[in-house]
Amino acid sequence: MSSVSDVTDAVAAASLADASGSGASPPPSSAIADGGEQVVTPWDVAGGADGKIDYAKLVTDFGCSTITPELIARVERVTGVRAHPFLRRGMFFAHRELDQILDAYERGEKFYLYTGRGPSSEALHLGHLIPFHFTRWLQEAFKVPLVIQLTDDEKFLWKSMTLEDARRLARENAKDIVACGFDPRRTFIFSDVNYMCTPFYLNTLKIAKCVTFNQARGIFGFTGESNIGQIGFPPTQAAPAFPDCFPHMFGLDKKSLRCLIPCAIDQDPYFRMTRDAAPRIGGHKPALVESRFFPALKGESGKMSASDPTSAIYVTDTPKQIKDKVNKYAFSGGRLTVEEHRERGGDLDVDISWKWLNFFEEDDAKLAEIGEAYASGRMLSGEIKQKLVECLVPMVAEHQARRARATDAVVDRFFSTAPRDFESMFGDLEGDWMDEPNGGGAAGAVSFQGSENAVATNAPETKKKGGGGDEKSVAAEGEAPLSKNALKKLAKEKEIAEKKAKKAAEAAAKKEKAAAASE
Ligand code: TRP
């Protein structure tokens, strides 16, 4: 067991967190922090004095690790797959215990992926797709199951949004997520509001009991103005890191699988808390792979804002809209005059077209060529923008085509809590699920809620308590098996309750009889 708790690490980060996350109105999602210190919380991202995020400082403050070239090489070796450009090019740049997931994987131990989205806008923008594209790649490279949480509850609590809208957006956004190419045979998508079932709630309770308000304030920056729904929310995002939240997929054993969470680095506070609680509730600490923020069209200072339509390209944009937005708003590192540009070359450090091409141009050689031409001044600002448009237009069109195939029946299949075969979700899958009847959609009605009774077949069974090293700490959380005496007491209480109920029923029957007789 680690002596240094993740939560204590996080206290250093607490000074970063200001009074964000309080009240119902959304904080500005990208700005320059007032005090000149950068601010990164799950709800608020602001650059330092120069408007930029200092990622190296985040890694130190949060206490995670940088992804090294050696680690990337190891991912490639273990999976036999070339690393995704997001990994090769440093967009996913930080991790926690990714190396241990690889160790376990090599030993033949299984793991699952967990990611999510807060459904706060009608249409997703390109930045929203990044974690999902990467997660899909991870799923295919490792051939493992995936759960995707839609935190409609979180968005209701933080934004000025009705629950009705949050729930509707969860379902709408699920279509865009499905369009990223996940396979429903090993992917489960759920809305918190719909899925909150006993196995899930049990985990949130156990986690919640491990975290004091002082700790939560340190990790998330809660204040006296925060509503108590917000303060109580973090365990809901933590819980899916434990496989027994999903009995229909993974069975009822909390340690049946390890968990790897791909996310943007602003989600780190949630999972620091989760990792701290994990051993205390008898679970594995989840591992993390964390990304930088996707730069806004108008220039790099934190995340893109969904509320400013000119700062983002949406998955619903037409080719003309994409072209116009890029030409008009994409922050340029080009020089003032053509002459000066030819002489000094474009500034790759600030040029958004270049930065976005780094995300989306998959061809390394082509990318290098563009970078060289632009930096040397041979390529002009308008020309690199054109390159970006040529890259984005087919990508967005493809997304739109795939989204059109995400019918209600297909979405229902991803939401389905019908028990699965555990083993079937690992390794190679045969054929394309889309070729199945009904476009791979749900066959019949699906239940929203999971249950302890709808358990996956062939799932690992809970090991008998007694040998595990975690038991003591688990007992502290009231999770240990009951003692003989306690069991006896419970049996006695049950017996008394049953007797009482029987007596009451007899009395009621007598009364009824008497009433009937006197009529
Ligand atoms: N809180 C995240 C958001 O607002 C959504 C989310 C829930 C998530 N669970 C997650 C993101 C796990 C990454 C990983 O977008």
Image: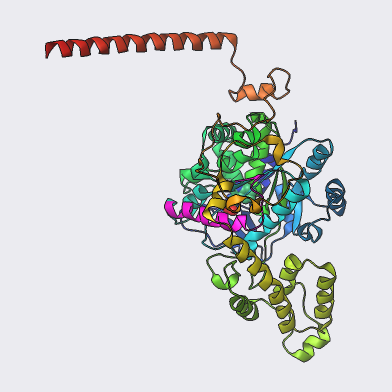
Q: Tell me, yes or no, whether the highlighted magenta stretch contains residue 20.
A: no
Examine the rendering and report whether any part of residue 262 can be seen. yes
Which residue occupies the extreme left position in the image? 519
Q: In which quadrant of the rendered image does the C terminus lie?
A: top left
Which residues are the magenta region? 164-188
- Does residue 508 appear left or right of residue 234 in this picture? left
Our reading of the magenta stretch's main secondary structure is helix
Q: Would you say 70 lies left or right of 155 here?
A: right
Measured as percent of width and height from the top left, residue 153 is found at 50, 47
Percent coordinates x, y for residue 354 in the rendering? 75, 73
Q: Quadrant of the N terminus?
A: top right
Q: Is residue 170 magenta?
A: yes
In which quadrant of the rendered view does residue 96 lie? top right
Instruction: Give me the residue at 53% from left, 51% from top.
Output: 409
In the figure, is residue 102 to the left or right of 473? right
Residue at image position (59%, 15%) is: 482
Q: Is residue 78 above or below residue 295?
A: above
In the figure, 468 relative to 199: above or below? above
